[in-house]
Each structure stands twice: as structure tokens, then as C-alpha cells.
Image (cartoon, rainbow, N blue to C red):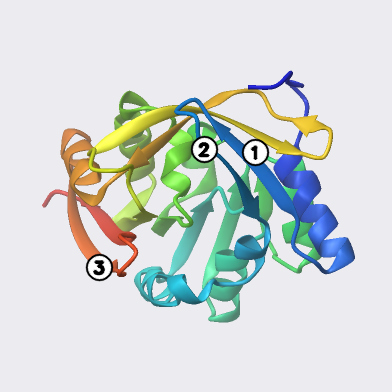
Amino acid sequence: MRAEDADADPIGEALLAHLDKGTPQAIEVTRDDGVVYDWSTGVLFDVPRALEEIDRVEREACRGRVLEVGAAAGRAALALERAGREVVAIDTSPGAVDVMRRRGLRDARQLDAFAIGPELGRFDAILLSMDSIGLVGTTEGAIAWLRQAAGLLTPRGGIVIDGCGYEDEPWASLQVQLRYGSLASPVFPWLYVSFEGLARLAADAGLETTQIGANPLGQFCARLSPGR
């Protein structure tokens, strides 16, 4: 891991550069399992072909009033808004929120996922797309956050999550750092979770899990709802 800056916003700066230049930017991802790779901002602006079916299923599952958590450039939120949904999109990155607002999203807010509460109102769907469930960091964090999010759902509401897992494990919490140019984020935990792992964590949070989509790459989409 490289020297970090507590105030650095590499994702936000990369998204702003993408918006201003009109070309995808590369964000370097370093994990403590030794994996280092570049992550393109392009997937946060436009749906990759491999994810088109997952994306369609997610949008169909998000009816009524929607909260998107970890919304990044607002790809999903904007598509939902264009489809007539009322959307609140949140992200911890100030740059990401700026990008969403500049792209025309009506309600984009800088807010931590664990800071959501009743002041936001009730939602028919809470969406974590592009593996954003990872931001809860740990299995304990996942259970706590799922309970917290469930408290914001309408009676027939649900939490919509996609993910890809980590090797053959039900879950894995890895230390991750992001870098864009000279900007390096603080090191933070990221939770990789399979469908089976998510179902186990959701059960501990009092939620029932239904798989609503999958693709040949091993990515899944699930809807979590309070037990009846």
C-alpha cells in the first residue's frame, strides 16, 4: 500500500476528469491479497455489455421511490430517474456527487452509507449496484447495515444488491487502496460476498434473499426483503 491522504478523493477526481475530458480514466486498485489492477471509470458511466442483463433486472426490481447507495457517476440512478422513479443517490465522494449533479440527477447527496436514517424517508427499493455492497467492509458491518437499511423500507420494499464474490469463499474482507494520479486514498476494508454468503448474512439481519439474476461471469443480483 502507498502513502495515503485522508482527504484524497481519487474516485471523485477520476470521475470529474472523465466527465470533463469525455474519456474513461484508470483508477489503480491495490488489495492486500497481492492483486493490483486498473479499474476504468467507463463502467460507472455506461453499462458494460457483460452486465446489461444484470442492469436490466436491477432496474425492473427498483420500483417507486429508490435510494441508491454508492452511486458514483449516477449511471443507475439516472436510468431509474429517466424511467420515472423518484431517486435519492448518495456517495461519500464529493467529486462523485458533483458529477451526478452536473449530469442532471435531481437529488444527489454526499452521505456515508452508515449515516442513512429516517430523515431520508421511506423507500420502495434500496439499490447497491456494481458490487457496492463491498463498502460495508466486513461481515459484521454487512449485518448491521442491512438491519439499518431495512428500517427505511416501505412494507413491500426490498434491498437490491449485485456482487461477484471472491474465489470460492462465501465472503472475504480485504484491505483496499485506490489511486488516481498522485492521489491515494486511505486504506479501507472492502467486503467481497457470494450469493450464498449474502443470503447467510441477510438471514442474520432478519431478511429473506431471492436471486433475481445471474450471468456466465459469476455475477449475481439479489433482492432482500424483511421476513413475513
Q: Given contact means CB atoms under 8 Å apart, are the residues at marks 2 and 1 in contact?
A: yes
Outermost residue on the bottom side: it is 83
Q: Given contact means CB atoms under 8 Å apart, are the residues at marks 3 and 1 in contact?
A: no
Among numbered discs 3 and 1, the one appearing first in the sequence? 1
Report the amino acid beneath label 2.
Ala
In this rendering, position of residue 219 left or right of residue 69: left
Distance of label 3 from label 1 (alpha carbons): 28 Å
Along the line of sight, the residue nearer the viewer: 151 or 100: 100
Distance of label 2 from label 1 (alpha carbons): 8 Å
Q: Position of residue 106 (x, y in %)?
A: 70, 64
Q: Position of residue 46 (x, y in %)?
A: 62, 71
Would you name the residue on which mark 2 appears?
113
Would you name the residue on which mark 3 appears?
212
Along the line of sight, the residue nearer the viewer: 91 or 20: 20
Q: Residue at x 55, y 66 (%)?
A: 76
- Secondary structure category for the residue under label 3: strand
Along the line of sight, the residue nearer the viewer: 201 or 41: 41
Q: Residues within 10 Å of mark 1 (few under 14, many from 20)?
A: some
Report the amino acid beneath label 1.
Thr
Q: Where is residue 182 in the image (x, y as percent from the top left)?
A: 84, 33
Outermost residue on the right side: it is 20
Q: In which quarter of the image is residue 200?
A: top left
Distance of label 3 from label 2 (alpha carbons): 23 Å
Q: Residues within 10 Å of mark 3 (few under 14, many from 20)?
A: some
In this rendering, position of residue 106 left or right of residue 187: right
In this rendering, position of residue 156 left or right of residue 174: left
Could you tell me how many numbered marks the image carries? 3
Would you name the residue on which mark 1 appears?
92
In this rendering, position of residue 151 left or right of residue 17: left
- Secondary structure category for the residue under label 2: helix
Among numbered discs 3 and 2, the one appearing first in the sequence? 2
Q: Which residue is drawn at 80% across and 33% down?
A: 183
